[in-house]
Amino acid sequence: LNNKHITNNNVVWQAGLVAAEDRAALLGQQPQTFWLTGLSGAGKSTLAYALEQELISNGRACYVLDGDNVRHGLNRDLGFSAKDRSENIRRIAEVAKLMNDAGLIVISAFISPYLADRELARQIIGINCFLEVHISTPLEACEKRDVKGMYQRARKGEIADFTGINSPYEPPTNPAGRIDTSVASIDEAITQLKQMLYKVS
Ligand code: ADX
């Protein structure tokens, strides 16, 4: 047994009989994780679901992990402190890794405001699978949309630690792509995202 396969609480990694490559080959695709990061209201979820629909219609097996939904289940115990956001992202990255291992293309849509958390996600998921995309819609545009009315509430001081208002957002320094949905249409954005996928597949 290799030491790296034993965790600090004496759990031993159990290897299966099928390789990740075999599962991917069965699905006829190379698994990837699109990691969409950006402010609330930037368009991450809209793009994630549109991309999922497009890829599924092209015969690709994929799945969306979305902030609002995951926080209803797996991460319902977490809030929006820096510590909780880090744990949120760590768990999502582990889930994305499992889904990639299962052969799926993952599209994740989380604010994921901290550079260090996204770097950890990249390490967990693996640099060859991880496609970081900054949904770079400016704060002013997100706030003007205010689809959930949260910016207005945050401005009134009703929401603590709201990203962009009283909690930081650290933009990626070298993302695989950048999309500003106050400028690009959904169709243009989907075309750009698909090109990223096929480049590495
Ligand atoms: S993250 O920062 O931990 O990555 P995540 O993407 O899971 O955030 O959740 C963001 C969603 O939670 C937002 O779209 C918004 O609807 C909601 N939300 C509630 N409180 C906050 C807050 N303080 N800051 C940002 N988003 C919040």
Image (cartoon, rainbow, N blue to C red):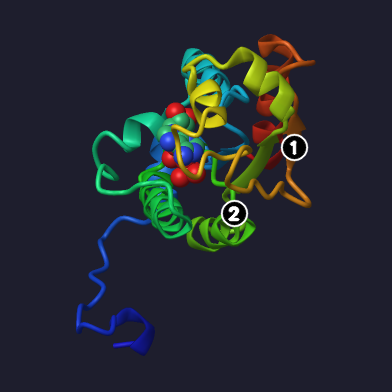
Residue 31, numbered circle? none
Most foreground residue, 160 or 60: 160
Q: Tell me which amino acid carries mark 2.
A: Tyr
Q: Are marks 2 and 1 in contact (CB under 8 Å)?
A: no
Find numbered disc 2 in the image and state the secondary structure of the residue it sits on: loop
Most foreground residue, 70 or 187: 70
As displayed, is residue 16 above or below residue 44? below
- Quadrant including the C terminus: top right
Query: Is tag 2's residue or tag 1's residue first in the polypeptide sequence?
Result: 2
Q: At 54% from the left edge and 18% from the top edge, which residue is drawn? A: 46
As displayed, is residue 53 above or below residue 82? above
Residue 177, numbered circle? 1
Most foreground residue, 76 or 64: 76
Q: Tell me which amino acid carries mark 1.
A: Gly
- Can you tell me whether the CB of the residue at mark 1 lies under 8 Å from the nearest atom of ligand 1? no
The percent coordinates of residue 81 (x first, y second) are: 44, 53
As displayed, is residue 179 above or below residue 104? above
Query: Based on the displayed image, in which of its 4 quarters is residue 27 positioned?
Result: top left
The percent coordinates of residue 100 (x first, y second) are: 43, 46
For discs 2 and 1, the disc positioned in front in the rendered view: 2
Judge from the rendering whether residue 60 lies leftward or rightward of residue 164; answer left or right.
left
Would residue 109 be visible to someone looking at this image?
A: no
Most foreground residue, 59 or 83: 83
Judge from the rendering whether residue 194 lies leftward or rightward of residue 138; answer left or right.
left
Residue 114, numbered circle? 2
Count of numbered circles on the image: 2
